[in-house]
Image (cartoon, rainbow, N blue to C red):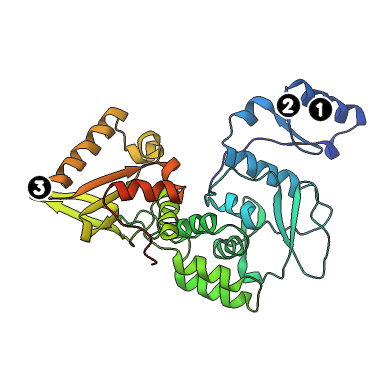
Amino acid sequence: MAYSFIPLIFARSLDSDDSRQRHARLALSGEEHRVSPGVYADKLAWDALTPRDQYIHRIRAVVETRAFDPVLVSHESAAALHGLPVLASWPRQVHVTIGRSNGGKSRGEIVKHSVEIPDVDVTTVAGLRVTTVVRTVIDIAANAKFMNAVVVADHALRLDRWGKREPLCTPDTISAALDRRLPARAHARISRVIRFATTQSDSPLESVSRVSMHTVGIPRPVLQQQFSDYRGLIGFSEFYWPDFKLIGEADGRSKYTDPRYRNGRTLEEVLLDEKKRADRLRAIGLDVSRWGWDIGVNPESLRRHLEAAGLPSGQPW
């Protein structure tokens, strides 16, 4: 996963104490950004980075100033390097995994996880030693909240129906990595995430919506159902309840603003295409219910929203 690179200034490599103090003053004045203790970057260049890229530079700064070696980046920090999404903002702290015998406590900008990692679960990204995607999915499942962990697992498993993207891992590779981790803490917790995860979730909003549905007992939907009419393919629904003739669409902002999804269309063209699609679905006897992040991430809000569309709740999956 590529990221935008900017140079970092390491105080330890500077010639004199005066140079170190000068960069500290530049950071205080706002001309430079203090990435980590003793590490600086140009402020304008830093502000132009995405939050993920800023976090990756913070990972680089922390790793390259550690006294212990080698450093293995893991958990949410590995997720950033692999391009896996997180539900909330990227953390301030950098997660690393060390062997059980190395000891050491988490402090300051670093969180240490004392676990033995086999070589097969280690790779290199952007010049840094990182847990593999499959191991990262498992580590996050063991430590994060269920909804957060499902977002990560769904993204890693996602199958592209158009064949333009290979899944980052498969159920089989996750199962093998989980076996390598045995016996281990939080095995039941990890297994719950993996059982719930799917290859058919196209976005984090779809993932959190599915968790919310499960939480309040909305009937289990069919995912990525294909629909056609006399003109041909209409499209694929994110959620479908055939017994209720209802389609659910989790519409995040990126669907309308991200160039990857707009395919060269203007915002007006995207909105018009969505209206035409909804009209064709209604013409074949289906209703469409839409919601955004504010509803999808909140189980009670989604329950009320889908009950208003005609679905029952309180039904365990």
Answer with mark 1 or mark 3, whichever residue precedes in sequence.
1
Residue 181 placed where, x, y %? Answer: 63, 74
User: How far separated are the C-alphas under marks 2 and 1?
Assistant: 7 Å
In terms of secondary structure, where does tag 3 sit? loop
Residue kind at label 3, given as amino acid type: Arg
In depth, the one of 297 and 96 nearer the eye is 297
Look at the picture and state if 28 lies above or below 244: above
Q: Tag on residue 80?
A: none
Q: Which residue is mark 1?
A: 23
Q: Tag on residue 231?
A: 3
Answer with mark 2 or mark 1, whichever residue precedes in sequence.
1
Residue 153 placed where, x, y %? Answer: 49, 60
Q: Is residue 231 left or right of residue 118?
A: left
Residue occupying image coordinates x 83% and y 36%: 11
Look at the picture and state if 51 lies above or below 250: above
- Mark 2 nearby-residue class (10 Å; few <14, some 14–19, many ≥20): many
User: How far separated are the C-alphas under marks 1 and 3?
Assistant: 64 Å
User: How far separated are the C-alphas under marks 2 and 3?
Assistant: 58 Å
Residue kind at label 1, given as amino acid type: His
Residue kind at label 2, given as amino acid type: Glu
In depth, the one of 266 and 193 nearer the eye is 193
Q: Which residue is mark 2?
A: 32
